[in-house]
Amino acid sequence: QKEVEQDPGPLSVPEGAIVSLNCTYSNSAFQYFMWYRQYSRKGPELLMYTYSSGNKEDGRFTAQVDKSSKYISLFIRDSQPSDSATYLCAMSGSSGYSTLTFGKGTMLLVSP
Amino acid sequence: ETGVTQSPTHLIKTRGQQVTLRCSSQSGHNTVSWYQQALGQGPQFIFQYYREEENGRGNFPPRFSGLQFPNYSSELNVNALELDDSALYLCASSSPEDRRAFFGQGTRLTVV
């Protein structure tokens, strides 16, 4: 079993839809949870950064972490064609030197 | 756009050759981590440098080595290149105080 599981998709939605992206993980030591957006083999861009369980909202994006279920989600409201990209979840432990463990990424396609 | 820059953006090497990739970290960040991203996969941790010392290593052979300089820029060296080394190589900068990791645009290495 991989440490972080993420459905690779592709996930196809019409413009304006609410998108839900998810990851599950097995390592209970993970404390910090991130979502990155990656366009066509460019460098990942940090979208959301959360600590422990709870919700965080930033514009059209909401990140949720449920540590009891080892499950994290990213919601995108009013999705736009420009949101079409691969979304990577990543997580790390409590140490300031912790490195990131990534999921495989979910490819999202938003059609006009 | 982050302040992390990588060079070169693309290169092609022959099996058995050696390659050096470079990364300039974001201002204020003293930690650099390198990741390898194969096509269709999430980034995999190679190693991390903190204040010029290797501070952790993933499951990569010794022919992957690195350096960090006093200005916190870094190099990744790969010796005896193999076809499977073809990937996008990503550099991320962070600090123990600011655990958010910001990535450069990556170097796409093709080994033929």
Image (cartoon, coloured by chain):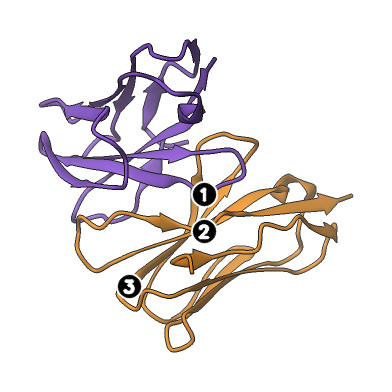
Chain colours: A orange, B purple
Q: Kindly identify which residue carries mark 1.
A: B42
Q: Amino acid at mark 2?
A: Gly
Q: Could you give the CA–CA distance between mark 1 and mark 3, rounded to whole angstroms?
A: 19 Å
Q: Is residue B4 above or below residue A35?
A: above
Q: Tell which of B111 and B25 is nearer to you.
A: B111
Q: Secondary structure at mark 3?
A: loop
Q: Is residue A22 visible?
A: yes
* Mark 1 and mark 3 residues within 8 Å of each other at the beta carbon: no
Q: Amino acid at mark 1?
A: Gly
Q: Could you give the CA–CA distance between mark 2 and mark 3, rounded to whole angstroms?
A: 16 Å
Q: Tell which of A111 and B60 is nearer to you.
A: B60
| B55 with respect to B57 (left or right) | left
- Please tell me which of labels 2 and 3 falls first in the chain: 3
> Few, some or many C-alpha atoms within 10 Å of disc 2 (few <14, some 14-19, many ≥20)?
many
> Few, some or many C-alpha atoms within 10 Å of disc 3 (few <14, some 14-19, many ≥20)?
some
Give the image quarter of residue A108: bottom right
Q: Which label sits on residue A103? A: 2
Q: Secondary structure at mark 1?
A: loop
Q: Is residue B28 above or below residue A62?
A: above
| B52 with respect to A15 (left or right) | left
Q: Which label sits on residue B96? A: none
Chain to which the residue tagged by mark 1 belongs: B
Give the image quarter of residue B4: top left
Residue at position x 53%, y 38% from top? B38
Q: Could you give the CA–CA distance between mark 1 and mark 2, rounded to whole angstroms?
A: 6 Å
Residue at position x 43%, y 38% from top? B36
For marks 1 and 3, give the one nearer the viewer: 1
